[in-house]
Image (cartoon, rainbow, N blue to C red):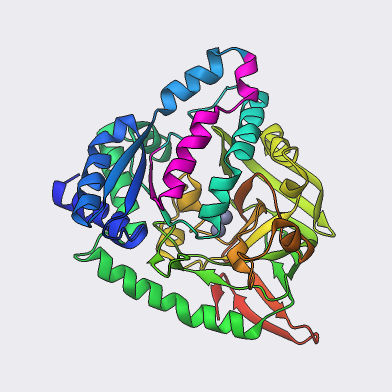
Amino acid sequence: MEGLQLKKYAELLVRSGGNVQPGQLVVIGCAVDDAYFARIVQECAYDAGAKEVVMNWIDPASTRTRYLRAEDSVFDEFPQWRVDWYKHHDDRGAVYLHIDSSDPDYLAGVDSDRLRRFSKVSSIATKEHSALTMSNALRWSVCAIPSPAWAKKVFPDIPEAEAMEKLWAAIFKCARADGADAIADWQVHSGNFSERLDYLNKMNFDTLRITTGLGTDLTLGLVKNHIWAGGGDVGKDGVPFYPNIPTEELFTMPDRMRADGRVVASMPLSRQGNLIEGFEMTFKDGLVVSYKAEKNEQTLADIFTMDEGAKRLGEVALVADSSPIGKMGILFYNTLFDENASSHLALGKAYPNNMENGTEMTVEERVAAGCNDSFTHVDFMFGTPDMKVVGIAADGTETVFFENGDFI
Ligand code: ZN
Ligand code: ZN
């Protein structure tokens, strides 16, 4: 990929994504194989006035080897120094930028019990850090760049170099970073969200009834005083930012006790290197009471055994079928892209800022108000080109506002 375009993309992450402010600490999370791009982002962050840019290198390949070869007991503990590492940067108001390029299959064949156990201890240990990012007390942003393994997974039938070019092009298009001025394009994109958000927040529906031709028929209660969000977000310090590049979704908080009916996934779910395919689940009073999958059902089951909250919903998101990602029709095997291709639900933790005063309340207060809490948050897609959503007001009035896969 051409240097100038890479720099523009890096600037989008720094200036729009995390919106790095002069004098601010920046943490960049990136795989060692992608150091070339992380270094461009680092330069851009210093150009934006960052006080210091800390590199947080990861290596999916050696993570895999650790899962395969380390002694079993290590997966039940999370090092305290790592918790302190996050706290050190959190206390200094860091902006977290993350560059994702992971091979969707990098954990394939790894013992799922090890993954589940380590995922649980990591979530518990980093709970404070997650709470800070999920409540926008700290700004953060994630973007993606191709890696050869990922590119080959998405485009298996062409040579690697060609697949890389093709994935770069798809990423730029999805991220609306293919124009002359991506930062300006994002301002326009963000403005388009406002109209729909205003409508949904004004209607203040009590319940959504969602149906698709695949068989989804879900009656989903929303929490009282829920807030629809999408596009940009605003940090607690009042500085706007975009947590996800790309972003196409409008999302809010379902009531953890009010989901009834069947949800049939419309896309496979890539999870810890395994692809869960042809799956569906049935809810009663907000709880998953049955589920099945044609492929990797155990991986799906492992999500539900995390904790009670993992069996309830923490997010409902609407994505127009006409979004650039949806139109592309590519399965990216990466939630950042696939969740912006299609309407989705998330099992697990809800975003506190999807509820009035949510970020000021304690976890117990939020849960009592219907906000789901969990150590996990797993998005899965169910949107289809024939999806319909009826909004039901507290007085029972019904309004169809989403039909044939798009907002009316
Ligand atoms: Zn979402
Ligand atoms: Zn989500």
Q: What percent of the width, then of the height, locates residue 102?
A: 42, 36
User: In the rendering, at what x and y percent does residue 166 appear?
Assistant: 29, 45
Q: Is 280 placed left or right of 353 in the picture?
A: right
Q: Is residue 386 visible?
A: no
Q: Is residue 27 above or below residue 396?
A: above
Q: Is residue 372 above or below residue 98?
A: below
* Residue 379 seen in this snapshot: yes
| Segment tinted magenta in the rendering | 72-101
Q: How many marks?
A: 0
Q: Quadrant of the C terminus?
A: bottom right
The quarter of the rendered structure image containing the N terminus is: top left
Left or right of 157, for residue 310 = right
Percent position (x, y) of residue 363? 70, 57
Q: Nearer the viewer, residue 167 or 303?
A: 303
Q: Residue at x 14, y 51 (%)?
A: 4
Foreground of the two, 373 or 305: 373
Does 373 appear above or below 232? above
Image coordinates for residue 218, horizontal then vertical, percent: 75, 64
Image quadrant, ligand 2: bottom right
Question: Is residue 356 depicted above or below 150 in this figure?
Answer: below
45 magenta-colored: no
Residue name at image x 45 percent, y 75 percent? 193
Q: Residue at x 58, y 22 (%)?
A: 110
Q: Quadrant of residue 307?
A: top right
